[in-house]
Image: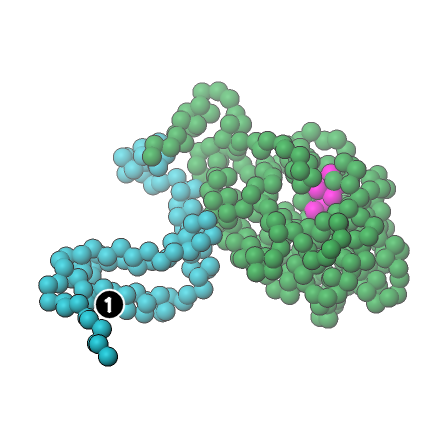
Amino acid sequence: MTLREMIDRLLGRQQASATTAKHRLQLVLAHDRSDLNPDLMEQMRREILEVVNRYVELDLEGGDVSLETEERATALVANLPIRRVRDDVLPQVPAVQ
Amino acid sequence: MTGSSTRTILICSGKGGVGKTTLTANLGIALASQGVRTAVLDADFGLRNLDLLLGLENRIVYTAQEVLAGNCRLEQAMVKHKLQPNLALLPAGNPRMLEWLKPEDMQEIVGLIQPHFDVVLIDAPAGIEDGFKNAAAAADEAIVVTTPEVSAVRDADRVIGLLNTREVEPIQLVLNRVRPKMMQSQEMLGVTDVTDILALPLLGLVFEDEQVIVSTNRGEPLTLNGSSSPAAIAYRNVAKRLQGEEVPLPDPTKQRRGLRAKVRQLMQTKLF
């Protein structure tokens, strides 16, 4: 964060347009580069939440799964606030043959 | 993708109007005046303009089309610049060439040019369709031109993605039409914003310069006549860096002096 950004934020002003441009570009490029369409993204997001939710109780409202990109590498970033760990989950022991 | 020692460099951008052809013309002249035998190849068959920027439009007899068809020899089609004989242009043919031109045709043309020159600059068309792919097929390395605007950077990213799959290397960046004042007030994407996003080494930084328009009007590239305008210096420095010389890049945020500039600089201080 630069001094200008700090002052803008304190005064409740709109941030400098270069900052907005950078953030918008980073988002749009993450999607351009991954070639994932929004429907697939949404499906993946739902399935990830579903799996994690089996083990821990999630705050589904605050959850966020998104693509982020840095240095031309794209990463899937999940931010999933945990309410509590489920105590009714039994570790699945592989069946002995 | 040839084994010869001639460097074949694609100049591309994705988006149109960011300065590909202007860079090709000025870089060509700058390299030539630094003693490098340089060929510039107009691969924008649909909307050719390189001849016009170089002031060679009235001297075209044959084009790449006649060379490919075997109707003339390469030497007959290459237009040598009168004031800078180290530079020659191979003009683009008729727009109808787009209908049949294949990547192999571009490779053939470049193969014919290479033995006579040290550097071949290919002026690519805008877009990422066949015209671009044909041009890219003949190149070993690339210079991506962009401006600090969201649409230009996004399109440049697309092009870089395509070049990466084609093993074109190195790919270097020229950031064009930089307005230092706007960068200082953080109303234009900064240099590191763009280089971070595109993850390319910066080969050149060209400030917005009205002299570019004047020189295009005359058909005399800025690098032709010892101009000391900011863009002329920037283009000459691109040529030097391309040959491995270390020339420091200017810092757009430190272009002006005085109290206001100091305040602007202070506002850009990174807090965390």
Q: In this view, does B200 lie above or below B68?
A: above
Type of secondary structure dominating the magenta stretch:
helix
Q: Total number of numbered labels?
A: 1
Q: Is residue B258 magenta?
A: no
Q: Where is residue B81 in the image (x, y as percent from the top left)?
A: 83, 44
**SS category of the residue bearing label 1:** helix
Q: Tag 1: residue type? A: Val
The quadrant where residue B234 appears? top right
Residue lying at 85% horizontally and 47% vertically, measured from the top left: B80
Q: In this view, does A93 lie above or below B180?
A: below
Q: Is residue B29 magenta?
A: yes
User: What quarter of the picture does the C terminus of chain B occupy?
Assistant: top left
Residue lying at 55% horizontally and 38% vertically, measured from the top left: B178
In front: B99, or A49? A49
Residue under pointer 1: A51
Give the chain letter at badge 1: A
Q: Where is residue B155 in the image (x, y as percent from the top left)?
A: 53, 55
Q: Where is residue A18 in the image (x, y as percent from the top left)?
A: 43, 42
The colour of chain A is cyan
In front: B126, or A55? A55
Residue positioned most to the front: A97
In the figure, is residue A70 to the left or right of B1?
left
Magenta-colored span: B24-30
Residue lying at 38% horizontally and 56% vertically, measured from the top left: A75
In the figure, is residue B203 to the left or right of A75?
right
The colour of chain B is green
Residue lying at 44% horizontally and 23% vertically, measured from the top left: B262
Residue positioned most to the bottom: A97
User: What quarter of the picture does the N terminus of chain B occupy?
Assistant: bottom right
